Amino acid sequence: MPGSTQSPEDDGRCGLKVDFVRAVNHIAAVTRETRIPLEIRFIRLLARRLHEYGTAAHRLENAVTSASLRLGLHCEIFSTPTSILLAFRDVDDPNSDSYGTTLIRLQPGSIDLEKLCAVDAIADDVAAGKITLAEGADRLLEVPGTPPVAPLAGQLIAWGVVGATVASLLGSTWTDAAIAAAMAMLTGLFTLRLGARWKEAGSFEPIVAFLITVGAYGLAAAFGGGMVPNVVIGALIILMPGLDLTIAITELSTGHLASGTARFAGATVVLLKLALGVMLGTQVMLWLGFVGDQPVDPSQLSPGWFTWLALFATGIAFGPLFNAHLRDWPAVVVAAVAAYASSYFATQAFGSEIGVFLAALTIGALSNLYARLINRPAAVMRMPGIILLVPGSLGYRALNFLFSKNVDEGINAAISVVVVLAVLVGGLLLGNTLISPRRNL
């Protein structure tokens, strides 16, 4: 601050003090957990881990309720994107006094397939008697410390592959695809290294969207890119909350109104912040003279065969993006290819809405079949499959039109988002009906 007399040494001591306090708080939290009855301690940790790794409210509540019954507890659970409320009673006497009620405050979870599978396996081992409750609780405490499957470089390459693929699918030149890959890798670097700090302040999405937009226009001017809006969408596609919107509608459809409403509102705010950052970046580059009509040579557009090659590469890239175990990567690739192929061919035959519906139905049924045959969570195939179908970019376009005061186009795009969400969720739910899931995850 201006006028401050604090020295660099003081800053260092403050940083050490903060780290020390965090370490003490962590030890205290672990100590408190060990004083709780083992059954309740295990269920609390199980609910926390499932939430942290992106489990939807209806699946989380069903999984926790089922695990509690196996341990002789009756658990009333209420889950939202930022909290879990748990109340326990003896399963043999539901009218008995409560063992205790716990409120756990959490940040919205993110998809981590490797850790989700680890939590699922621990719960299975405890239920089967392979490990004790104490061992299960200790393993749940250790799960967050598991290193990512891919190193930082591999994760950034995965971001770049997805960015280039999305830009190509939207209709871009080879140069545009290369710029989208570079900008997507930069987005990944911001997310993996600065995301947690900036998200606490609520400024992560608009700052990143602004920087990516400025960088995309700058590189397009330097190297001759002509489809910058598609480049920006490709670079920011992983940040667009299409998956959250889909989960929100699914939660609303299954009666979890509080969680679904909260998640939908949160996803909408993220879209607003991304659109705001892109709009500000575009205005700055327009003022600097970098925004204008760029001629596009049709011969430079990526050919049709490249789409399928890029799709296969994207399926592989989803492995590190979702932190899937190496043995699950073939399933992730199959899910991505099956989702896009079924959507593409069904759209050619019946139209876009039916195409999305049939693709979602295919992924819902296929993921449940995989869970039954391989004894792994259906999320391993379901999440990578539906990510290619979710309307994140459509929602961004709708808000971008509205920010540009193009109300008619904005309303039409918003209606398209609602329609896609409806048919997508309907397809997933029907897929669960055709082949019932092995378990709640």
Image (cartoon, rainbow, N blue to C red):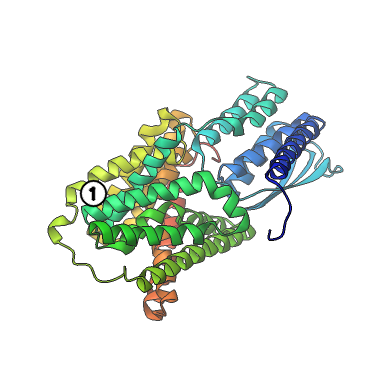
Q: What is the quadrant of the C terminus in the image?
A: top right
> Residue 236's x, y, as percent?
41, 55
Is disc 1 placed on a helix, strand or loop? helix
Choose between 187 and 267: the one closer to the eye.
187
> Residue 55's x, y, as percent?
56, 45
Residue with the mark numbered 1: 307
Which residue shows up at 27% across the image and 48% down it? Answer: 341
- Left/right of residue 202 with respect to residue 162 in the rendered view: right
Quarter of image, res 421: bottom left
Instruction: Name the amino acid, label 1.
Output: Thr
- Which residue, as the protein is rendered here, is positioned at the far left? 299
Q: Residues within 10 Å of mark 1 (few under 14, many from 20)?
A: some
Quarter of image, res 228: bottom left
Choose between 272 and 5: the one closer to the eye.
5
Quarter of image, res 293: bottom left
Query: Is residue 170 shown above or below 433?
Result: below
Is any part of residue 391 visible from this angle? Answer: no
- Left/right of residue 64 with respect to residue 345 in the rendered view: right
Choose between 284 and 173: the one closer to the eye.
284
Q: What is the quadrant of the N terminus in the image?
A: bottom right
Query: Is residue 2 shown above or below 106?
Result: below
> Residue 9's x, y, as percent?
70, 41
- Which residue, as the protein is rendered here, is positioned at the far right? 97
How many numbered discs sit on the rendered protein?
A: 1
Is any part of residue 311 visible from this angle? Answer: yes
Which residue shows up at 86% across the image and 42% down it? Answer: 96
- Left/right of residue 17 with respect to residue 414 in the rendered view: right
Which residue shows up at 77% across the image and 29% down it? Answer: 38
> Residue 123's x, y, as percent?
62, 30
